[in-house]
Each structure stands twice: as C-alpha cells, then as structure tokens.
Amino acid sequence: MGGEEELDWAAMLRFDQERSAIEGRRHDATAAGLRGDAAARSRYLEEVAQLEMLPRLWEFGVRLTVEEYQDAVRVRSWMIHEQRMAADRASRRPWPPGEHPDRHIRYYWSRDGRLLYVTTARDDGRFVANHGFLTPEWAERLRREIPLLADLVTRYETNQEAGRGHEGISAPFDVPLLGDAVPEPLRLWRERVEGELRRRAAEQAASRDPEGGPRPRPDAVPPGR
C-alpha cells in the first residue's frame, strides 16, 4: 500500500492555494492597512484577485493525478513569480548581483494554454523542466505534450549540452498579468483542465446507482452464491 497516486492531491492543492497563497495575501493586506500603507494594501488585494482566477479543482469531486497537481502548482507558481516581478518593478528596488528572481527560473506559455517551467539545478547546471530532469526521454515527452514549444525544448537541450544555461532563449510571446484580466493562455489552460475533470465527474456519477452507491459489475456474483 502507499505511493504517490494514493495521496489526496486535490486536498493538498486546496491547502496550498487557499491557505498558503490566498489567505496569506489577505493577511498581508490587512497588516498593510493597519500600518497605513494604502499602496501595499491595494497591491496585495490585487494579488488576491489574481490568485482567485485559478480554478478550484478540488470542487469537482474527483481525485487528481500527481501530474494534474503538479500542473496546477506550476501555474500558480508562474502567477506568484509574475506578482513578485511586478512588485519589484513598482518598488524600483535593485537586486544584488546573482539574486534576481529571474536568474534561474523561466516560464513559457504556449498559445494553446500549456505551461513549460524550466529551472537550472543549482549543483551541476542541468535543467529541470516541468518537474523532470531534461533527459532525452523527458525532452521527447515534453515535445509530444507541448508541441507548440517543441523547438524551445530542443534549444534547452542544446544549451544544456554546452553549459549555457538560459542564454539566448526568450519567451515565444509575452503573457502579461495585469489586474484581474485573465490572460488568454491561462483561460485556455483552465478550460482544458476543468473540462477533463467535468468529464471524469460525469463518468463517476454515471457509475453509481440512484442511491449513491457503486453500480454492481455485470459479472459480479450475487450474494449467497
């Protein structure tokens, strides 16, 4: 018994999203208001509104796979990263050399709403892309799963072999996070993941009898026989 697939990924996502992210920002907004920092309070409330654009995947009543959980975490991580970058730009605070938040991490959206997250492994310079080391097998899987970013994955393979990090690689197109306007790739991602969970929820409901219990299998042996 045990293993990743037996964990309640939906419950974990709910805790991460509601308690760690959204409630944390609300607490920051309250604290900013108490100290009279109206600008900071407004920014934190805007971040709350942005985080509430994320789908509440635990409300569909179906179990999430580890891949679905990781995908949702990547999207939230992208949003928090963009919020941090916006706050840095607004404060005009210079970052010490080597400490800028964009030094190791990159996020790339495809136009059909799929997200590629790439970071350098600090010890040896290898890349981690969407929770996997960028091996030839993993790179091929990423090209299949995100075909619109296949060339980008290949460029990262080339850079990894040459030890060049993120050098010379840029996002195919900009995905601004402005106010509470939902960026198009985020909207498409949300539609896709919610559609899949609705489909599974419908299948789950159809597999139960009118009283809510599971339907007997056609080949099941009746009790007492």
Image: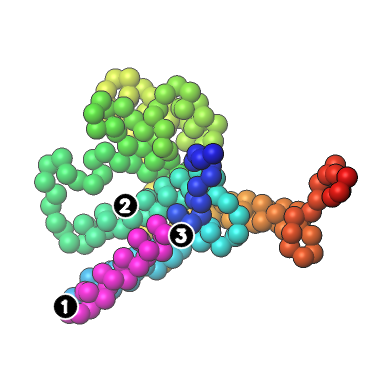
Distance from disc 1 to disc 2, alpha carbons, whole Å, reads 26 Å
Disc 1 vs disc 2: which is toward the camera?
1
**Three-letter code for the amino acid on which mark 2 is drawn:** His
Q: Which residues are magenta?
A: 14-36
Q: x, y (%) of residue 113?
A: 51, 48
Residue 35 marker? 1
Dot 3 alpha-carbon crowd within 10 angstroms: few under 14, some 14 to 19, many 20 or more: some
Q: Residue at x 84, y 50 (%)?
A: 223
Question: Is 35 on the left-hand or right-hand side of 134?
Answer: left
Q: x, y (%) of residue 54?
A: 46, 60
Give the quarter of the image for residue 60: bottom right
Q: Residue at x 35, y 60 (%)?
A: 20
Q: Which residue is mark 2?
A: 81
Lower sequence index among marks 1 and 3: 3
Under tag 3, what secondary structure?
Answer: helix
**Most common SS among magenta residues:** helix
| Magenta segment includes 10 | no
**Three-letter code for the amino acid on which mark 3 is drawn:** Arg
Lower sequence index among marks 1 and 2: 1
Q: Are marks 1 and 2 in contact (CB under 8 Å)?
A: no
Distance from disc 1 to disc 3, alpha carbons, whole Å, reads 30 Å
Disc 2 vs disc 3: which is toward the camera?
3
In the image shown, does 14 or 6 lie closer to the viewer? 6
Q: Residue at x 50, y 26 (%)?
A: 140
Q: x, y (%) of residue 6?
A: 53, 45
In the picture, the quarter occupied by the C terminus is top right
Distance from disc 2 to disc 3, alpha carbons, whole Å, reads 19 Å
In the image shown, does 5 or 69 lie closer to the viewer? 5
Question: Is 166 on the left-hand or right-hand side of 56?
Answer: left
Q: Which residue is mark 3?
A: 14
Disc 1 vs disc 3: which is toward the camera?
3
In the image shown, does 75 or 91 lie closer to the viewer? 75
